[in-house]
Amino acid sequence: MAESGEVSAEASRRADGVRGAGRGRQGRLGPFGLWVLASDELKERVAVFFRVFKDGDAGKHIVLMCNDPSRSSYADHLYKPSFAGFIDIDILETGGKIPLRTLIDHSMVESFGGHIRMSILSRVYPMQAVSNKARLYVFNHGESDIKVTHLNAYDMRSAKISTDIDQY
C-alpha cells in the first residue's frame, strides 16, 4: 500500500511513456487538458494535461500533470522534453475538480496544477502558432466526460522597459 505522498509501483508503471500521452492512450479519466500555442491544423501544439489513475493498492486516485511540447514546432533540431509530476490532491475531496493555471507567451508555457502543488515550465519555439495565429483548444481523450467549469484568457501587455537610470 502506498503511503501518503508516495506513488505505488502500479501508478508509476502506468505513467511511463508520458511523451505523447496528450495525443493518444485513452484511459477512463484522461488524458484531458489544453493544447496551447496550437496552429489551426494542430500540427504545432503543446499539450498541458492530466491523467487520473486509480491506485490498485489503496483505491485512491492519483493525478499526473504533464507538459508535452514534442509537437511544439515544425523545427526538428530543437530539444523538446516532456515533463510530468504527480500532484498530491484528493479529487474526491475537491468534488472532482483539478485546478490548472497556465501562463503562455510566445516561447514559454508555464502551468500550475492542483492549487500550485505542481509547476512545470517548458520553453517552446513555434513557427506557425505565433501571435494572432496561436490557438487554445480543450481536449479529452478519456472514456469519461469532463467538464471545464471556468476558462479565462487574458491578454498580457508588453513590458515597459526604461533605460533612464536617473528616474530611480
Image: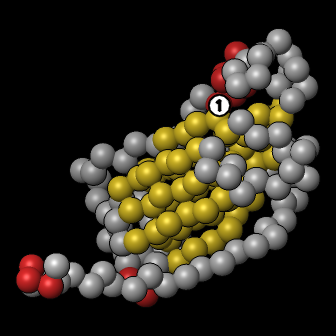
126 shown above or below 152: above
Between 70 and 49, the residue placed more toward the observer is 49
Left or right: residue 30 compared with residue 49: right
Instruction: Provide residue 59's location: percent of width, then percent of height.
Output: 90, 26
Instruction: Provide residue 88's location: percent of width, then percent of height.
Output: 71, 36
| The N terminus: image quadrant | top right
Instruction: Provide residue 122's location: percent of width, then percent of height.
Output: 41, 53
Which residue is pictured at 77% across the width and 34% down the height? 62
104 shown above or below 157: above
Q: Which residue lies furthest to the top in this view?
A: 1
Residue 46 shows in the view: yes
Which residue is pictured at 70% across the width and 63% down the height? 139
Under mark 1, the amino acid is Ala
Badge 1: residue crowd in 10 Å (few <14, some 14–19, many ≥20): some
Which residue is pictured at 83% across the width and 40% down the height? 90
81 shown above or below 161: above
Left or right: residue 77 compared with residue 95: left
Which residue is pictured at 47% across the width and 43% down the height? 82
Between 72 and 101, the residue placed more toward the observer is 101
74 shown above or below 121: below
Secondary structure under badge 1?
helix
Left or right: residue 33 compared with residue 35: right
Q: Name the residue under label 1.
A: 15
